[in-house]
Structure formats: C-alpha cells, structure tokens
Amino acid sequence: MTSLTRDRDYATFVEDERALLQRCAFLLVGQREAADDLVQATLADLYARWRRVRDPRLVALRLLHTTDLGALPDSSPRARFELLDARRTPEAVDPLVTLLGTLSARQRMVVVLEWVARVPTVEVAAVLDSTVATVADVARDARAALVRAAPELADDGVLAARLDAAVPPDVRSVRRYDDLSRGQQLVRRRWLRRTGVAAASVLLLVLVATQLRPVAQTPVSGPAPAPATSTVTVTPSPTTACDRAQLSCRASLVRTWRATVYEVVADYLDPEGAYFNASSYYARDETDGLWDTKQGALGMEMFRVGNGGTQITVQIATDRSYAPRCGAATGNACTSIRFMDGNRYVLSDGLDAVDGLEGQYRPDGREVITVVVENRGSAPTLAVTRGQLVSLLQDERLRLPAL
C-alpha cells in the first residue's frame, strides 16, 4: 500500500466514523475535553497501525478502551482526563452519563458498543479480547445495574434513545481536525524512540558483558533493597480529582494505569505496534484491599490474539511481600546484579525470550516492578533480549497509580 493510498483510505475512514467515535468516547469518559483528547489519540494510533489493520472500525473502538492519552503528540498537551477537575466547575452532564460512570470500565464499554456503536456480540468480544459468554455476562450485569437505578431503562427503545440524547450537540457534531498530521507525528515519534532504544540496548549489553558482576550466585526469593545512592528520579503517578473511595474512580484509575503500562511495554519491545494487539486485566490481578490498605499489587498481561506465542506479564507491588518470587514463572534461577550507577536488579539466567526472561527492580526502595517474558507454544514469537528487559524496567512511567 503506497503512502498516498494509505492516507486517502485513512482520511475516508475518519470522515465516515469520527462522529461515532466522539459519541462513544463521551459516554465512556463523561467529559467533552477528555473525549476530544481520547478520540484524537485513538485516531493517531490507528494511523500508525493502518498498514496492518483489517477492520479499522473495530480497531478504533478497541483503542478507545486502551489508548493512553499521554501518547498523543501535541506541542501543548492537556493533562490526562479526569472525572472531576477541581480547578473549574464540573460541566453539567445528562444523568445517564453519571449513571454510566458508576459501572466498571468493561461494563460501560459493553453498553456503548452494543447500544451506540451497534456492534454484534461476537465483535464486542473481539474488541474486548474476551469470549462471547463473558461479554454476555458483563452486558447482563451492566443492564441490571442501570435498571436498578432507572427502571425505565429496561425497555430497549428507551435505553437507546436516552443514550443518544445524553450526547451534547457540540460533541456529536464533527469539527475539523488534522488527524492525518497527528498520525504522521506519532509514527515519526515512535521511529525516533525506537532508534534511541536500540542504541541504549546495545550499550546495556556491553555493560552487562564487560562491567557488571553478580553479587549473588543463588536464586533469591525477592528483589534486594535499592541502595540509598540510587540516581533514578521517581515520577509520581498521574493523579485525578475523583474520589478513590468510589469504585468508578478506582476503575478509571486502573484503566488509565493499564493503558500506560501497555504503551510503555510496546515502546520498548514492540515500537512499531506490529506484534501485541491485546491485553488483559482481571480482578485476580488486583490484590484484595489494595485501595483501602494501600498495600498490594496490580498486574496485567500483553499478548497477540490469533497467532502469537509471546506473552508479557507486568506486576507492580507496593513492597516485596506482594511481589512474586523471581524464577517462579519460568523456573529459571535468578541473580541479584548491581549496576555501576548503584541500581540493583534481580534477573533470571535466561538471555532471551526463548529461555524465558524475568526481571525485578525497586526504583525507590519500596515499589517492586516485575516483568516476565515467556514464549508459549509454536506460534510466531517476539524477539526480546535481556538488555531490552532492563531498559523497560528503568522506565519511570512504570509506577502504581495513586492509591
């Protein structure tokens, strides 16, 4: 596909589908500005993937669910979306939008896909990387929650009409955006980042081979404390003004966290977006009482649906007692390695994804970042090296959300 053909086809798609994406985004996040940012980021990322996309509409809807707003290349980007901005009076929204905000992120997405985008259940399952049976369960629970709060929504016609009316006219009207230019900017930014990561990986491999010596030769049960002289600067997690006592707020924070982690891992291990196309986050990945006690862990997986054998597991724990034992996933022995800058990592003995890679890092002496790379089955796999794993562990965006 030539560049001109790609650009023409992409522009046609945007003209046909942007209005729908705007309506869906508004019902998902509940704010005009946030919805605008989300759609722009989604369409930029879609352009970067365009050569490999078979069904751009479904891919765009999936990106509404996973896109990290910080990925949008902009000379003056706005902050990530918030449920409530304390700096100004909250905008008035339809009561149904507020009611949607009480649902989980997945329930809200299923409602929007089914009743606004009119996506068949089997395609909803594809968008959410789930099964038809699971989607049916989520849809039933979401509808029951809506009906409990507003019994009239038990009528299909009423629900569809109310959802349509909940989107303000200025959101449903398509304004002029330079989506093609934004997509091209994102492609250039990823190319530059990829070349930088490649250079850093080569340097890390040289350091590991010539300068670094293991400080322990036996498997360890957890990551060693980071020395007080660590030079890593910790960037606090993005905060929002929503009430963390509310389940809807927690769901929003986890959704943003998940999108951030996906973007970080893809930046280092799949910068062209050619391999990973799905992620999963389930209740089992969140420690019970995490939000109430501020102790526990969040985890997620990244993989390729349909024809992929490489799976990435990322977990971030509040302290070492909630982190898995290095080596437990792959069965490899692990060694604590101290770099010349004072940072200490616990790394498995494997050199690449074929052997199985595991790494742990404590950037601030408290939170423990664990990344596991495994090749499963005979499907096509992604080449990942130990040096890339160390580079990924160092990224300051890998932090827990503010609890």
Image (cartoon, rainbow, N blue to C red):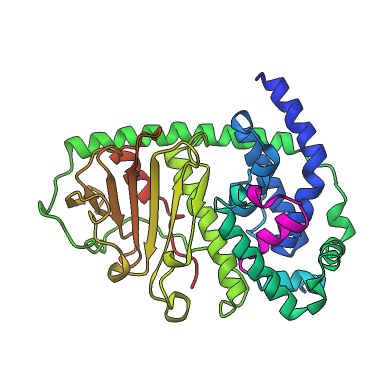
Q: Position of residue 128 (x, y in %)?
A: 59, 52
Q: Is residue 282 left or right of residue 173?
A: left
**Front-most of residues 263 and 205:** 263
Q: Quadrant of the N terminus?
A: top right
Would you say residue 119 sits in the magenta stretch? Answer: yes
Residue extending furthest toward the left? 217
Q: Position of residue 131 (x, y in %)?
A: 55, 53
**Front-most of residues 348 and 368:** 348
**Front-most of residues 329 and 254:** 329
Q: Position of residue 236 (x, y in %)?
A: 48, 64
- The answer to whether residue 105 shows anywhere in this view is no
**Compared with residue 377, is residue 253 higher up or lower down, i.e. above or below?**
below
- The answer to whether residue 156 shows anywhere in this view is yes
Would you say residue 359 sits in the magenta stretch? Answer: no
**Front-most of residues 7 and 398:** 7
Q: Is residue 86 left or right of residue 210?
A: right
Residue at x 65%, y 39% (from the top left corner): 46
Residue at x 28%, y 67% (from the top left corner): 320
The image quarter containing residue 290 is bottom left
Q: Main secondary structure of the magenta part?
A: helix
Residue at x 63%, y 59% (from the top left corner): 80
The magenta segment: 104-123
Q: Is residue 34 left or right of residue 363?
A: right
The image quarter containing residue 159 is bottom right
The image quarter containing residue 86 is bottom right
Q: Position of residue 330 (x, y in %)?
A: 25, 49
Residue extending furthest toward the front? 133
How many numbered marks have been drawn onto this rendered protein structure? 0
